[in-house]
């Protein structure tokens, strides 16, 4: 029942929007220096002194309250929040902090009361309404959370968060079609957000609308062709829906567009081509890539496996023999050589290869 990720305040040096006396200003500057030095004790001391030099500054007291909460002194934090509101009723952040503290201690009724007071004090305080949404959702009050989200849609700079949270809440309620609509809006606004994308695809799956999910992600890939996340998601969708040829074609497309990782895409693409019995294409792709990455052990081992599957064990054996034993896959190549030699009726050579592999391993360990 705790509010995720927002219970512990993110301590950043803030600009206090009040004119401080000179002594208070100096202490606040020392506090900022202590922040950058990650000296919590000094932060507390300098901010406490700043508040003493300017007892009317509610913002300083709220900031000091955050530090006390962060150092596991919630009672002192709440006391300072109340003092801040006494000297400056417009210190709306004090309500928010007391709501966070109450939520952390599972006093959900008090947490809701403080968060709603924070919103009454400052309706534009995003931290308060976001946490109130979490609070309502964590109490199985999803309909109230949805109402709050609808009220704040259009009033925030982060519309994607509203749509994402709305979609996630609708998904909990089993309202998959509505969830899809909201989550699509979130993805349209932030196509690289993994949470939105994963949740909308899950909603599509729950609604048995996977063909539509494929069409949606295909449209995103066309609009954002450089997005590796979307392209990888499309490969997964093609695989999930049994469109294996489309999956490998998408991988080959990535191979062409990402020269820095061409070796990796070649290995993956060749693996798919092999499964689809498209051996000639796999062999051609791997050999072409080896011209760019000569001697690459992963490419060479994959080529050997494809050659063997295609019915050419002698060529596969030659490829395995070309792998440097000191590489990561060197031992695999030696074992595969021995296996192939044995299958080809060349048992003595197979034994010699295994002996060489064991000797090399022993020398490496020593």
Image (cartoon, rainbow, N blue to C red):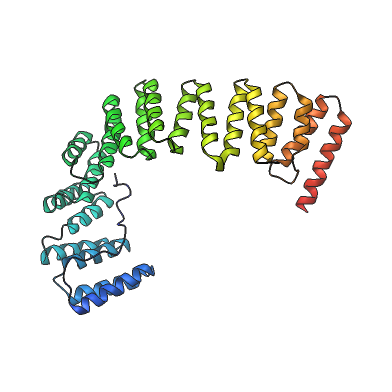
Residue drawn at the location 84% of the way across and 32% of the way down: 350
- The quarter in which the N terminus is drawn is top left
- The quarter in which the C terminus is drawn is bottom right
Residue lying furthest bottom: 23
Residue drawn at the location 76% of the way across and 43% of the way down: 325
Q: Above or below — where is 134 with respect to 249?
A: below
Front one among 233 and 278: 278
Q: Can residue 173 be seen?
A: no
Residue 214: image location, x then y, percent: 40, 25
Residue 213: image location, x then y, percent: 38, 25
Q: Give the image quarter of residue 144.
A: top left
Q: Give the image quarter of residue 70.
A: bottom left
Residue 252: image location, x then y, percent: 54, 30
Front one among 180 and 171: 180
Q: Is residue 136 left or right of residue 342?
A: left
Residue drawn at the location 39% of the way across and 34% of the way down: 198
Residue 263: image location, x then y, percent: 60, 38
Q: Can residue 204 be seen?
A: yes
Front one among 190 and 349: 190
Q: Is residue 189 left or right of residue 61?
A: right
Front one among 191 and 55: 191
Q: Above or below — where is 24 with respect to 286?
A: below
């Amino acid at each position: 029942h705790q509010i995720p990720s927002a219970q512990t305040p993110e301590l950043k040096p803030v600009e206090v929007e009040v004119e401080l006396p000179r002594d208070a200003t100096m202490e606040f500057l020392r506090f900022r220096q202590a922040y950058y030095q990650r000296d919590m004790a000094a932060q507390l001391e300098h901010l406490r002194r700043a508040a003493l030099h300017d007892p009317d500054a509610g913002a300083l007291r709220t900031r000091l309250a955050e530090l006390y909460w962060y150092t596991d002194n919630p009672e002192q934090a709440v006391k300072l929040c109340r003092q801040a509101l006494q000297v400056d009723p417009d210190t709306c952040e004090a309500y928010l902090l007391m709501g966070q503290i109450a939520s952390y201690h599972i006093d959900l009724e008090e947490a809701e009361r403080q968060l709603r007071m924070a919103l009454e004090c400052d309706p534009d305080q995003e931290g308060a309404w976001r946490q109130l949404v979490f609070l309502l959702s964590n109490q199985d009050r999803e309909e109230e959370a949805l109402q709050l989200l609808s009220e704040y849609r259009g009033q925030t700079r982060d519309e994607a968060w509203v749509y994402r949270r709305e979609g996630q809440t609708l998904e909990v309620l089993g309202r998959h079609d509505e969830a899809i609509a909201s989550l699509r809006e979130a993805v349209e606004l932030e196509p690289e957000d993994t949470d939105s994308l994963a949740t909308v695809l899950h909603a599509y799956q729950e609604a048995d609308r996977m063909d539509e999910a494929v069409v949606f992600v295909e449209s995103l890939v066309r609009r954002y062709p450089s997005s590796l996340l979307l392209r990888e998601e499309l490969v997964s969708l093609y695989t999930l829906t049994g469109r294996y040829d489309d999956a490998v074609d998408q991988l080959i497309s990535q191979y062409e567009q990402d020269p820095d990782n061409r070796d990796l895409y070649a290995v993956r693409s060749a693996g798919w081509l092999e499964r689809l019995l498209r051996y000639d294409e796999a062999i051609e792709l791997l050999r072409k890539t080896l011209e760019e990455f000569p001697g690459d052990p992963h490419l060479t081992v994959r080529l050997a496996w494809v050659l063997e599957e295609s019915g050419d064990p002698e060529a596969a054996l030659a490829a395995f023999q070309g792998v440097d034993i000191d590489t990561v896959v060197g031992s695999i190549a030696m074992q595969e050589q021995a296996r192939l030699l044995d299958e080809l009726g060349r048992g003595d050579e197979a034994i010699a290869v295994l002996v060489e592999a064991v000797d090399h391993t022993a020398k490496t360990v020593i």
